[in-house]
Image: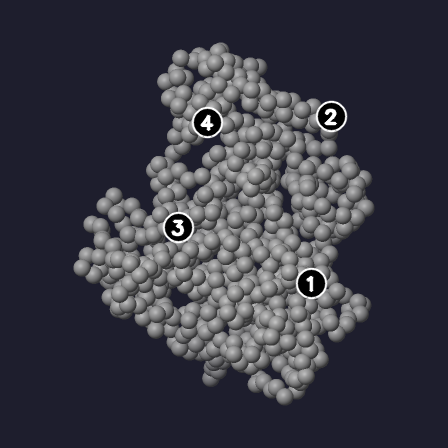
Amino acid sequence: MNDILQLKGNFEQRENSNRPGPATLLAHQCVKVDHLQSLISDLNQLQIFWENNNLLRKTLISVYYTRVVPKSNRISRLLKSEVIPNESIVGAKFKSTNKQHKHVITHYVPVSSIKTTIQDLKKAIRILNEFFNGKIDTDTFNDKTNLTKIDFSKYTYDDQTFPKTAFEKVIVDASFVESFGLNEPTDNVENQSLVTFYDTQTNLLELLKKLGIAATPNQKLNSTTVLLDEINLKILYEKAPYLVSMATEDLSKLDPYYFEESLNNQSVLTIDEPKNEPTIGVIDTQFDKNVYFSKWVKSTSLIDPNIPMETSDYTHGTNVVSLIVDGPTLNPALDDGLGRFKVRHYGVALARGFSSFSIIKAIQQIVLENPSIHVWNLSLGSDKEINDNFISAEASELDNIQFENDVIFIIAGTNKVNSLSSQRIGAPADSLNSIVVNSVDSQNQPAKYTRKGIVLSFFAKPDVSYYGGTPGDYMNVVDPLGMGKVTGTSFAAPWIARKVAYLIEVLGLSKELAKALIIDSAIGWKEGVDNASIALKGYGVVPQKIDDIVKSDEDEIKFLVSGVSEKYDTYNYNFPVPLVDDKYPYVAKATLVYFPKTSRNQGVDYTNTELDIKFGRINNDNKIKDINGNNQTDNNGFVHEYDARNLFRKWDNVKHIGETLKPRTRARLSYNNPNWGMSIKTKERLNHNDGENIRFGVVITLKEITGKNRIEDFIQQASFRGWLVTHLSVENQVEVYNQADETINFD
């Protein structure tokens, strides 16, 4: 097998030189006076409602779009106030009709914005009636000579001018807007819940007080989310449901898993003293300190000591920890070649149920108190399904923690309540920055208890799958009473946590590269990865042996690159792919991972930053001929937002692009420039520079179609072009890791 290579070199950075062109209508559009009058009617009703409601300083208005819209197609003139409309957004949802998703985006704007928008629409109506017979289509609108005959200075109202650009923006905005309205929650919550309010720049506790709801600072999760009991929840929904952005019930039961106590006794098992093995953090139910490997575990319980504990409260946590510490001993057939790991365990839940609010608070503190731990296993999961329109509070907090800290969570994909039914994954398995793990059987087919992704209609969750035990082929674990046989995603996740900890702690990879390498290893060279497959298995099943992850086949050149996005385009056109008779006898694939900042209050538009990757040959126009046919940022390369999300994973923080190895695959000709290039373009959703200095990791694989080993040619040419090439040598890195842990005594 070949070593994986690490390439270190400089990525160039450049600003976005593209400037917005004139406002145009999409093909086959026609904006009519009747539609503009309908929008005015909507706004008149909203104006009356808010003028009779003094609860807020401004108004909440939802824009119902005709489709899923990119940032460039959101309204830019309608609802404009002291800030541009994109900066007044406080929420985004999807409304589904006939299996088609449509955006519903909520803004927080002053009443004056409603009045100005009504006047803008009235002016546009006058122009349409006077010059275009009450309607304007794409061809007429996009031919700008049709607007030169109009004296726009005539359409001033209250000293507010209405220039040509304003008219153009109103027409384009209206072509995407179906209606305006007051969006109220559809979530059916009745019990104690975590309620998130639209961000109205109002003190949350004071706002609740106006509604007759008494809440204390201890009930606040953050500036927009508070824990409310059943009585106060009812008051809120009766008096002001329009304030609620999202709500989820707080109390959850541990998602079900199968447990069977065996006749074996753990007393026959022994274990050495721990040395310098890496440490993995575990957040779970309680840990039994009487098990044979307890000296490998430092455990802390965060449950009130006055609450009585039962044996069952120790079972799940002890099961999970046993796999991380000594999984290969307990399950020899699943030996991954990684040995043992130490564990720092925190007991935050009981078997009978847990509070999301309490666990979120606990995790925040746990991570801050343990900066030396980079990998955390979280096999706790809710029995309830995730919501279509927002990320769970638990997952959102985990995503924030991973954005702000050098940590990564490995999360179980959760299990079905009833194996015969279809059930979506439960919180926190909707965490985008984490690695979410589902379970498969020995034939790599989804286990019957596996629940389904996708998240927010298209985000790829789970990430990967692994073996979690199945009836007849159970996972062996340790429990407080001896040995146990189990099945569940809870017991697949620890095996991935072991692998990720090895990649980060021993091999020294960044969390971006570690996650990318895990996902890339699961994908292999299979043809296509569609949403139906991802929903159950993620990108695939991770190989069992670590060598199958950190090495490649002899006919492959696999290399890792990482960098930091500082400007719009981060690029390098200097990848030396070896030529053979002026041809490239390879198929290629690449997996990109980054950890973006996220905004839960933006609903379905959850990730703040998009990194778009292109990789391939450099054509004679000095542009990258992308191996995935990605034309999102090309001239005349318009792609509908819905298609961009599904075809190119736009806004997803994991991108996999690649070609399929087929029997008739032929070598490809080179262009004038013999090198290949990579470009990573950064796009912002909220104009807050959240993607500035964001780190990324990419795994690239070139497979030689004739089976030849060309890695030495690649190394030689890469070194000649200024790349620092190192081998990801397991043996060398283990030696370095061991030496780093040695104690040096000075005389």
10 Å crowding of disc 1: few (<14), some (14-19), many (20+): many
Sequence-wise, the earlier of marks 1 and 2 is 2
For the question of whether residue 334 can be seen, the reply is yes
Q: Which residue is mark 1?
A: 254
For the question of whether residue 13 can be seen, the reply is no
Sequence-wise, the earlier of marks 4 and 1 is 4
Q: Residue at image x 59%, y 62%?
A: 450
Q: Is residue 368 above or below residue 111?
A: below
Q: Is residue 86 left or right of residue 478?
A: left
Q: Residue at image x 49%, y 65%?
A: 541
Foreground label between 1 and 3: 1
The residues bearing labels 3 and 4 have C-alpha atoms spaced at a distance of: 32 Å
Foreground label between 1 and 2: 1
Q: Quadrant of the N terminus?
A: bottom left
The secondary structure type at the circle numbered 1 is loop
Residue 359 image position (x, y, % from top left): 68, 59
| Amino acid type indicated by mark 3 | Ile
- Check contact, mark 1 vs mark 3: CB within 8 A: no
Residue furthest bottom as drawn: 268
The secondary structure type at the circle numbered 2 is loop
10 Å crowding of disc 3: few (<14), some (14-19), many (20+): many
The residues bearing labels 3 and 2 have C-alpha atoms spaced at a distance of: 50 Å
Q: Residue at image x 47%, y 84%?
A: 747
The residues bearing labels 1 and 3 have C-alpha atoms spaced at a distance of: 39 Å
Q: Which residue is mark 3?
A: 613
| Amino acid type indicated by mark 2 | Asn
The secondary structure type at the circle numbered 3 is strand
| Amino acid type indicated by mark 1 | Leu
Q: Which residue is mark 2?
A: 52
The residues bearing labels 4 and 1 have C-alpha atoms spaced at a distance of: 51 Å
In the rendered structure, find residue 29 and report the number of the disc placed on it.
4
Q: Is residue 472 left or right of residue 569?
A: right
